[in-house]
Amino acid sequence: MTQIDATTHQPSPKLRSHGQPPASSIRRLGREVIPNYQRVHLAIDPSRADYAGFLAIDLEIREATARICLHARDLKIAEARLSQGGTELSLLWELEAEDILSLKASQELEPGEYHLEIDFSGEFGTQASGLYRMDYNGNSYVFTQFQADFARQAFPCFDEPCFKLAYQMEVTAPEGLLVVSNTPVESEEVEEGTQTTLFCVTKPLPSYLLAVAVGPMEAVELPGLSVPGRVIALAGQGHLAGEAIRTTPPILRALERYFARPYPFEQL
């Protein structure tokens, strides 16, 4: 299977952007295919310019179709696999205009439950959008900024707020770096100088609310909350967390009173 350019039908080089992020796609994905769960694995080394990834998505096809569309921008697709009940189905893909990754099956897909896996790679951005890296005081960091529709720059996904699904983030990084995401850590494994951090499954979220950060960061405890809390700072900057530590607990308590419910997530 090869990645085909939609206009020339020739093997396509990786698409790149420079300067400001491209204009948002005006094409909507439709509701024929609904994602229910997405696991995203990212291999991140902040000292490098590029990264690799793998994702697995549980899908529900609601109307018969021969094509599954996701969002993807500036990514190289190495492999895509679709299966149903353990049976793998033949699949081709192409990157279309307006940030669309189109996956085409050799036969019409009947309504039902399917499993999609994609191997991909990309380059870290240099603007504060998508999955981007920065250097500060001799250290390298990787952060995300997915709002409003920049998750598609980090990995293929259903990058519209109408799709709210459970995500599970997993990050492999050099040993000794701090890795954080939306949810608490489920497990950590260290092997040959690398660490793999698996985070707990999120509650149903739109893609723009996902977050990942990797680097030699400091974590400062944030006491007085109804859930565990931390302030994450760059190396050597933890002493600047004082104002956040002072003001966050009363702000969160006020919000809980206003909405008449506890803070609904596992950590802050």
Image: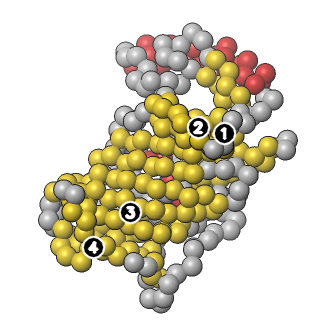
Distance between the Cα atoms at labels 2 and 4?
Answer: 36 Å
Residue type beneath disc 4: Ser
Q: Which residue is mark 4?
A: 90
The answer to which of 211 and 147 lies nearer the viewer is: 211
Is disc 2 in contact with disc 1, using a CB cutoff of under 8 Å? Answer: yes
First of labels 2, 3 by sequence position: 3
First of labels 2, 4 by sequence position: 4
Q: Quadrant of the N terminus?
A: bottom left
Report crowding for label 2: few under 14, some 14 to 19, many 20 or more residues within 10 A (C-alpha): some
Q: Which residue is mark 1?
A: 175
| Secondary structure type for disc 3 | strand
Q: Which residue is mark 2?
A: 190
Residue 208, how many percent across, how many down?
Answer: 48, 47
> Quick check: can you spot residue 143?
no
Q: 227 above or below 69? A: above
Numbered mark located on residue 70 in the image: 3
| Secondary structure type for disc 4 | loop
Residue type beneath disc 3: Leu
Residue 65, how many percent across, how many down?
Answer: 20, 70
Distance between the Cα atoms at labels 3 and 4?
Answer: 18 Å
Q: 261 above or below 166? A: above
Residue type beneath disc 1: Glu
Residue type beneath disc 2: Val
User: Within the image, what quadrant is residue 174 found in?
Assistant: top right
**Residue 96 left/right relative to 230:** left
The answer to which of 97 and 258 lies nearer the viewer is: 97
